[in-house]
Amino acid sequence: MMVSYTRSNARSNESIDFGIDNFTTGSQVGGPLPWDAPNQVTSWGSTPLPSFWKFKNFDFAYSLLYHTGFPFATVNNFGRIVNPPGVFRLPHFLTLNPAIEKKFTFHGYRWAARVGIENITGSSNAPSVDNNVDSPTFGEVFGQGHRTLNGRIRLLGKQ
């Protein structure tokens, strides 16, 4: 099992990326950059299931990711900056991906078959948000995540 924690800080005195495809107007402001997520926990691991369980010779594997929400700037109906980045953030994100794996031999080769559930928490890692303070849906996030069941078969090599 492995667990890691990262505390980071990504700030600039020019946190708004003005460009031809970005209709935001106003003075340049300092603050966190769009990828600033100060707290992140990552964990993954694998362990054999106890032999007294129904599933003998199976392994349990998982991965976990948690991070704080990313910052975003808010604008009004005219595209003018109301709040600089860092005042509002996207929701925190937590995903847990458990899986069960069975290793077996077939035609002289070692194989591993795995079935798992991705994002069992159903948490969304929203890529965008309605950042218009004059909008009735201000703060609503888009791009919701969902649970998925997946499987895979790996070739581990000759026996």
Image (cartoon, rainbow, N blue to C red):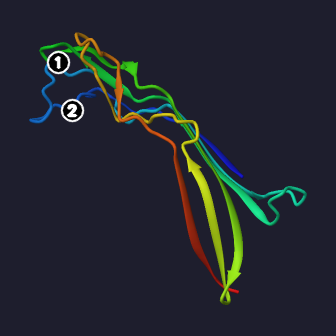
Residue 72 location (% of width, % of height): 33, 25
Residue 70 location (% of width, % of height): 41, 30
Residue 149 location (% of width, % of height): 54, 51
Residue 68 visible in the displayed image:
yes
32, above or below 76, in the image: below
Q: What crowding class fits label 1: few (fewer than 14 Cα within 10 Å), some (14-19), or many (20 or more)?
A: few
Q: Quadrant of residue 66?
A: top right
Q: Nearer the viewer, residue 47 or 115?
A: 115
Q: Are marks 1 and 2 in contact (CB under 8 Å)?
A: no
Which amino acid, mark 2? Answer: Asp
Left or right of 115: which side holds 26?
Answer: left
Residue at 49% from the left image edge and 31% from the top image edge: 38
Residue at 76% from the left image edge and 63% from the top image edge: 58
Q: Nearer the viewer, residue 112 or 132?
A: 112
Which amino acid, mark 1? Answer: Ser
Q: Quadrant of the C terminus?
A: bottom right
* Residue that carries the numbered disc 1 in the rendered image: 27
Element on which disc 2 rests: loop
* Residue that carries the numbered disc 2 in the rendered image: 17
Residue 31 visible in the displayed image:
no
Question: Which badge, 1 or 2, comes first in the chain's sequence?
Answer: 2
Q: Nearer the viewer, residue 61 or 102?
A: 102
Q: What crowding class fits label 2: few (fewer than 14 Cα within 10 Å), some (14-19), or many (20 or more)?
A: few
Q: Quadrant of residue 41?
A: top right
All told, the count of numbered labels is 2
Q: Quadrant of residue 78?
A: top left
Cα distance in 3D space between marks 1 and 2: 11 Å
Residue at 28% from the left image edge and 28% from the top image edge: 15
